[in-house]
Image (spheres, rainbow, N blue to C red):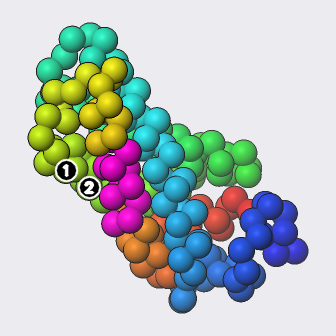
Amino acid sequence: MEHDTHTGHTEQHAPHEHLRPGPVSWPAAARATLHCLTGCAIGEVLGMIIGTALGWGNAPTMVLAIALAFLFGYTLTLWAVTRAGLGLKAAIGVALAADTLSIIVMETVDNGVLLLVPGAMDAHLSDGLFWSTLALAFFAAFLITTPVNKWLIGRGKGHAVVHRYHH
């Protein structure tokens, strides 16, 4: 049975293209990047909410947001592969192998955008500047990280590791 048949994916590509080194489609790379972006976005927004609520400055809030981005990014992968039957110790190894480079690139890009946009770091959660800059940052991170994930998956790394267990 093809992976796409039982996961609801409808893109046309070779069966199990993400399981073997070699050419990888852009849609496969985009799916891996969106998975990573979901965890990062949850962690970053939660970190910013917590830091703001506690009255922290920009630096500690950013550190918390980045830490939570890694935590939630890894947690989404852990959840998927443990549900597929992998033990926790092995699942941690898979999550680290699958997500680390992707999250590093994503966090570097999106936090870089936040630092570069004038006033974004001082904007409050109720400001349009905060949310528009965050959306721009996540979009930029997606655009830059997708080719990284395509490269990783094409070499049997990154989310290709996850799909060995989650299919």
Q: Amino acid at mark 2?
A: Val
Specify the label residue 11 is tagged with.
Answer: none
Mark 2 → mark 1, Cα distance in angstroms = 5 Å
Tell me the magenta residue range. Answer: 134-144
Residue 52, x across and y down, in percent: 27, 17
- Residues under numbered marks 2 and 1 in contact, where contact means CB atoms less than 8 Å apart: yes
Classify 10 Å Cα crowding around label 2: few (below 14), some (14-19), many (20 and above): many
Q: Which residue is mark 2?
A: 109
- Kind of element beneath mark 1: helix
Q: Residue at x 30, y 25 (%)?
A: 127
Looking at the picture, does residue 25 appear above or below residue 125? below
**Is 116 a magenta residue?**
no
Looking at the picture, does residue 105 appear above or below residue 68? below
Is residue 26 rendered to the left or right of residue 147?
A: right
Q: Which residue is mark 1?
A: 112
Q: Which residue is nearer to you in this view: 108 or 93?
A: 108
Q: Examine the residues drawn in magenta and state their main secondary structure.
A: helix
Residue 134, x across and y down, in percent: 33, 41
Is residue 14 rendered to the left or right of residue 74?
A: right
Residue 24, x across and y down, in percent: 55, 82
Say whether residue 116 is visible: yes
